[in-house]
Image: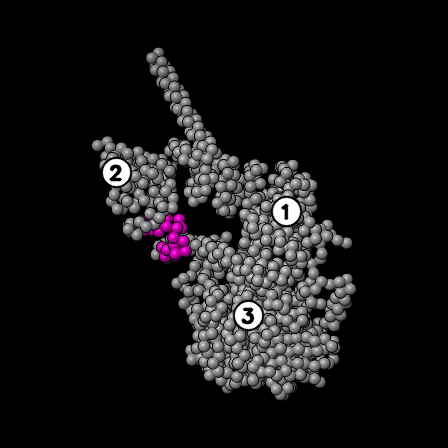
Amino acid sequence: MKNLLGYRAAAPLLSGPSAAGCVLALWLAFCGLAAGQSDKPLFQSIPPSQSGITWVHESARSEEHYLPETMSGGLAFLDYDQDGWMDLYMVNTGPSEFFTPTTPLSNALLRNQGDGTFRDVTAKAGVEARTFGMGAAVGDYDNDGYPDLYLTSHGRTILYRNKGDGTFEDVTEKAGVLVEGWTTSAAWFDYDNDGLLDLFVCNFVKFSKEHHISCGLNPLGKSFYCVPRVFEPTSGKLFRNNGDGTFSDAAEGTAIGEVKGKALGVVTADINNDRRLDIFVANDTVQDFLFINRGKNEWEEVGLFAGVGLSSEGSAQSGMGVDAADFDGDGWQELYVANIDHQYFSLFKNNRDESFQDLSISSPLGRSTFLLSGWGVRFFDFDHDGDLDLIQANGHPDDMIDEYASSVTYREPLLLFENRQGGLVDISDQAGPAFKHTYPARGLALGDYDNDGRSDAAIANIGEAPLLLRNQSQSGHHWVGLRLVGRTCNRDAVGAKVTYSVEGKARTRFLNGGGSYLSAHDPRLILGLGPADKVDWIEIRWPLPSDKVERLEEVPLDRYLTVEEGKGIVAPE
Amino acid sequence: MRRPCLLGALLVGALFFCVSLFLTVDVRAEAGADLLEEGRQSAQAGELSSALLSFSAYKQEHPNDPRPYLYSGMALLKAGRGRDAAIELDEAAARGLSEAGDAIEYARGRMELGNLREAARALAEWEESDRLPAEGLWVLSDIHYRLKEAQDAQRVFEKFAARQPDDPRVNLRRGQIYIYLEEYEKALTSLEHAVWANPESPEAHFEMARTLYYGINFEAGKKVAAKAVALDPDNPEYLHLLGITCDRLEQYDEAVSHLEKAAELPGAFNRIYFDLGNALRKAGNTARAQEVLKTYRSLHQESEAQANRDKIIEALLNQGRLQIQQGDIGAGRSSFLRVLEQDPDDWLANSFLAKIYLSSGRGRLAQPHVDKLLELAPDSSEAHYLAAMYWRQARDASKALSHAEESKRLRPGDAELRNLLGNLYFALGQWEEAAQEYAAAVGLAPDRLDFQANHKTALKKLNR
C-alpha cells in the first residue's frame, strides 16, 4: 500500500528491486548470513600486540589550530622487498614552520614478516621522511621491478627510489618532482601511454604560518579550524616521466595547470574507454575536476558538463576521498566521492558519453553518509561474490565538534557497503566489532597482507595508532588473484582492463592509479567467483603502448598468479 | 507663628518647584515624543532627511533612549542605506531595547541586513521569558527557519500557532518547517490544509509540490507545481521546480521549456542555469547545454568568489580583534591590512586601523582610513569622531571641533566623544563649553574619574 504521499520506496542505487527481487535479496541475504554464520566477524581488528605495529600517528595539534593538523594520515600497502608479502608504509607529521615535535617523529616502513606480524625497518630502509607528511603514492616509475614511493606533505614532497636492496634513496630534486607547498594525494599512471609511469600530485591550498588565518572563536569560545574557503586555491601538478630517471612539468599550458582547486583526492581511470587514463580530482569547497585525456598531453576539464563537478543542487562540496570502478558491471567505470557531513557522498553512474548521473540522493548510501565526513574509500569485493562492495573511513576534521554539534561527532564509524543487486546496502552493523567503534580516520588502504585472497584494510587515524582490519569473511567463494607485470606497457600495468567470465557472466576490473585519500593499495587484483567453482576465462587487455590482449583459460583458483605481458601466467605465488 | 508660616511657604514653594519641574519634564518628554512621532511619519512618507533631523533632535535631549537610533536605522534601511542603518541599529542595541515591540522592529531590521544571528539574539531573551508577543514569535521562528535551525523554528512556531491558531499563515509555515525536518508526510498534511484554506495560493501549491519532489513523488509533484505556475506564471522559483520535476520524470524537453522560461524571468537565480544545462544535455542538445553550463559556471564562480572573500574577511576580522584583545597590536594591524587587500572599503578594518594608528600617535597613517570612513558614510558619528581625533593630532582645532560637533549631533550619548569635545574646547580656552561637555561626559559615565578630573579643572578655569 502506498503511503500518504504515494512515495515510491527509496530504491537501492542503480536498480530498483522488484517484489521478486526483494524476495531474492532476502533469500540471498539469508544464505549469506547462513554461509557467514561463524564466530568470526567479517573484519577483525588486529591489535598491536598481535601485528607488531606499535607506531602511532602524531596529529601535531596546536592552540593556533593550523589547518594541516586536521588532514594528515596517509598510508600505503606495498611489497617493497618483493618477497610476496604486502608491507605497510605509514605517513606521519613532523617538523614544519608551524610545528616543532617534542620527540623525533618519523614515517614508518613496516615489513611484513609473512606470519601476520610486521617489523619496523624504517631507519634501515632510509624512509623516515621527517616532513609534515600527508600521503603516499606507490609506483615503479623506473620499471626495475621494485615499487618506489612518492610522499606528499605540507612542506616538500619526496620521491624515494627503491634501490632493490631493502633501501631507498631520496631522488626528489634529481628527478625534478619536488613540489613545495601543501600536497595531499598523488597517483602514478601512464597518461601518455609510453610505458612509463607519470605522476599527478594534488595541491591543496596556499597555507603558511605567515598567512595563517585564525577564524576567531567557536561557540565554546575556543579557536577552531577554518574552513578551507578562506585559503587560496592552487593548481595540480602533472609530471611526465622522461624515462631517464627525470620528469618534466607537464601541467603547464594545459587545463591541469590552469584550473585552480583545493585538491584532496585523486583517482586516474579511463572513464570513456578510449584507453587513455583520465583524472578525477576531489576538491574541498571547489567543484571537483574531471580531466579528460584527449591525447598528446591535451586535457579537457569537464567536471561540470559531465555532472560530477558539483552537487545535484549545483553547489561545490567538500570532496575528500575518491575512487573509480565498474560498480554496475557494464564495462564502464563509475566514480565515487566522499564529502563532509551534511553533504551526500556521491556515486556517479557512468552514462557512457562522458557524463554521469549522481545516484546518491534519496539512496541508502546518501542516508548512511549524510552526517559523516568521508576520507579513505575503496571499491573491493570483500566476499568474493563477484561484485564490488565499498569500504569507507570517516572522521570529522574539527576536534571540538562534539561539544557544540548535536548530530555530528569527531570520531566516526567505518562503513561497509555490500553490493546487492546493483544497490549499495550498509552492512556495517554486521561487519564486526571494529565497525561499531569510532575513529578519527583519514587514509584507508586495502591490501591482502596475509595472502589469503581476502582484501584486508589498514586505516590511518589522525593522532592515534592505525587500525589493521583482517578480512575473515567466510563466504566460501572461490577467487583468483592477479599480479600483472607489464613489459611494453608500464611495469605496474596501471590502466590494464581485466575481464573475466564466470558461468557465462562477464565482469570487468580496471587497474587504476590512486584512489582513496592519501593512500596506496595492494596492486594485485582479486577476482571473486561467487558460488562457481571455475572461471570460464580471464582476458587481460594491457595498457598502451602494448597492443596485447591476453586470454587465460583453465585458470587455477584460490591463489595469486603472476601474469606477465605477452607470456601469460608465469608463476603462481 | 512665623516659623510655621515660613515652613508652609517653603513647602508651598517646594511643591510649586516640584510641580513646575514635573511639568517641565513632562512637557519636554511630550515634545520629545512629538519629535519621535514626526520622525516616524516623515520616514513613512519617504522624507528621509526630515525624519533623520527629527530623530537627531530627539537624540540631543534623550541621549540614552534607543528609539531614535532604532527608528533612524529603520528609515535608513528603507532608503537603501544599509551600512548607515547598521550603525544606527548598533547604537540602539547598545542602549538596550526595553520594549518588545522595539525588539521586534530591531530584529526585522537585522534580518533585512542579513544579520540573522543578531536578529535571533535580540528576541531570544524575550522568548525565553515568555514576554514576546505573537508577532515576535512569528518573526523569531522565521529567523530560525532562515538560519535552517529547523528544531528551533518549529519550537517557536508552535508557540505562535498555539496563540494564533487561526492565522492563515499557520499551515503553510508548519508545512515548510516539516520540509526542513524532512518529515514529508506531516509537511504534506499541513500543506494540504493550507491549499484547502486558500486554493488560490501559489505559494501553498509550490511548497506542496516541493514536498512531493523531495518525497520522490514526481508525478503528483508535477501536477501541483503546474498549478503553482498557473497561479503565478512569473515566478522563476515555481517554474524551476516544475522544470526539475519534469527532469526527474525524464521529460527532458518539457523540463527545458519550463527552465528556459524561468531563466528569462526577472529574479531568475543561478541554479536555473545549472538545471537547464543538465536538462539540455539529457535532451541531447549538447552544444546548448555546454553554453548554458558555461553561463552557470561563470555565475557560480562569481558568487563563490564573493562568498570566499566574505569568509576570508570575516575570519581576518575575528583574528584581528582577537589579536588586539591579546595585546598583539602589530599582528592585529596586519590582519586588518589583509582585510583591506580583499575589500578596501571594509568599514571595520578601516575603523580598527584608524584607531590603532591614532592611539599610537601616527595620525598620518590613520588619515587614509579616516578619509575612507567619511567617504563611505558621511553621516557616521564614528567617522566624524575619528576625524576629530585625527585633526586634533594634526593640531587643527577648528577642523577637529567641526567633526566632533557633527559626531555629537549624531551620537550625543557617547561619553568619550563628549570628553573629547571638552578637551577641544579646553584647548581653545573656551572654558564654559569645555565644562559643559565634561559635565555631559561625567553624566554619561559617572565612574570615569578622568572625566571628573577634567570637569573639575574646567570649572576651576571657568571660576577664575
Q: Position of residue A399 (x, y in %)?
A: 52, 61
* Label 1 Cα neighbours within 10 Å, binned few <14 / some 14-19 / many ≥20: many
Q: Which chain is mark 1 on? A: B
Q: Are marks 3 and 2 on the same chain?
A: no
Q: Which chain is mark 3 on? A: A
Disc 1 versus disc 3: distance between alpha carbons? 40 Å
* Residue wearing tag 1: B229
* Label 3 Cα neighbours within 10 Å, binned few <14 / some 14-19 / many ≥20: many
Could you say which quadrant of the image residue A181 lies in?
Answer: bottom left
* Residue wearing tag 3: A292
Q: Are marks 2 and 1 on the same chain?
A: yes
* Residue wearing tag 2: B426
Closer to the eye: label 3 or 2: 3
Q: Earlier in the sequence, mark 2 or mark 1?
A: 1
Quadrant where the image shows the C terminus of chain A: bottom right
Q: Nearer the viewer, residue A571 or A221?
A: A571
Main SS of the magenta part reads helix
Classify A54 as above or below B46: below
- Which portion, as a residue range, is magenta? B332-360
Q: Amino acid at mark 3?
A: Ile
User: Is there CB contact under 8 Å for labels 1 and 3?
Assistant: no
Q: Which chain is mark 2 on? A: B
